């Protein structure tokens, strides 16, 4: 069993930055592919970013490419999402997720078995 706890959300003005953190429990965290998803009101949950166990196979949604950076620290069981140049359309609940299979290209919700409770990010214009 893996437990994921996100933090770092909040209210920020357009053009600002936030850094989300995800703390993971479990001895096998370092073998998982980790992802960030988001869900805005009235919309489906969407993929944001992905990172494999070794820090490779980075993947980003087109909407955040060049603005967001995913990273991880396996020694601390942490995953991060640095969000720069935030836009009002980035407003959503952001979720951390874990894919125990260590998939190379995991970007679908069903590929992730474990989810955090989410953290709210609100970007004002």
Image (cartoon, rainbow, N blue to C red):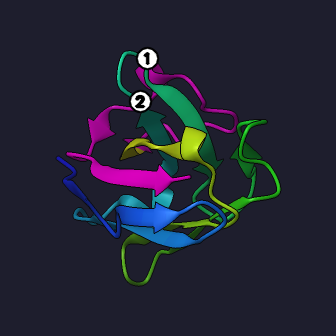
* In contact (CB < 8 Å): disc 1 and disc 2: yes
Label 1: few (<14), some (14–19) or many (≥20) C-alpha neighbours in 10 Å: few
Q: Residue 8: image x %, image y %?
A: 35, 70
The boundaries of the magenta stretch are 98-125
What's the mark number on residue 40?
Answer: 2
Q: Using residue 71 as the reference point, say whether residue 62 is left or right of it.
A: right
CA separation, marks 1 and 2? 5 Å
Name the residue rendered at 62%, 53% in the picture.
52
Element at badge 2?
A: loop
The vertical placement of 12 against 116, above or below, is below
Most foreground residue, 84 or 65? 84
| Quarter where residue 67 is shown | bottom right
Left or right, residue 81 beside residue 55: left
Q: Is residue 16 magenta?
A: no
Give x and y (percent) for residue 20: 43, 66
Element class at badge 1: loop
List x then y, in percent, for residue 35: 51, 46
Image mark for residue 71: none
| Residue at (60% x, 32% y) in the render | 106
User: Residue sitting at 46 percent across and 43 percent down?
Assistant: 91
Report the front residue among 99 and 44. 44
Q: Which residue is mark 1?
A: 43
Query: In the figure, is residue 64 to the left or right of 117?
Result: right
Is residue 105 within the magenta segment? yes
| Percent x, y of residue 60 | 72, 44
Dot 2 surroundings within 10 Å: few (below 14), some, or many (20 or more)?
some
Determine the residue located farthest toward the front in the rendered image.
125
Q: Residue furthest right?
A: 66
Q: Residue at x 69, y 33 (%)?
A: 105
Q: Single out the residue that lies furthest toward the bottom.
A: 75
Seen from the viewer's position, the closer of residues 30 and 77 is 77
């Amino acid at each position: 069993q893996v437990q994921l706890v996100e933090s770092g959300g909040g209210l920020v003005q357009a053009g600002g930055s936030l850094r989300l953190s995800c703390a993971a429990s479990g001895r096998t965290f370092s073998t998982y592919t980790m992802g960030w998803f988001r869900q805005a009101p009235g919309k489906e949950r969407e993929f944001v970013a992905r990172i494999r166990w070794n820090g490779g196979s980075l993947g980003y949604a087109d909407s955040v490419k060049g603005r967001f950076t995913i990273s991880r620290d396996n020694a601390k069981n942490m995953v991060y999402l640095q969000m720069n140049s935030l836009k009002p359309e980035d407003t959503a609940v952001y979720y951390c997720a874990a894919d125990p299979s260590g998939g190379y290209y995991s970007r679908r919700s069903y590929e992730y078995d474990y989810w955090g409770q989410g953290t709210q990010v609100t970007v004002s214009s």
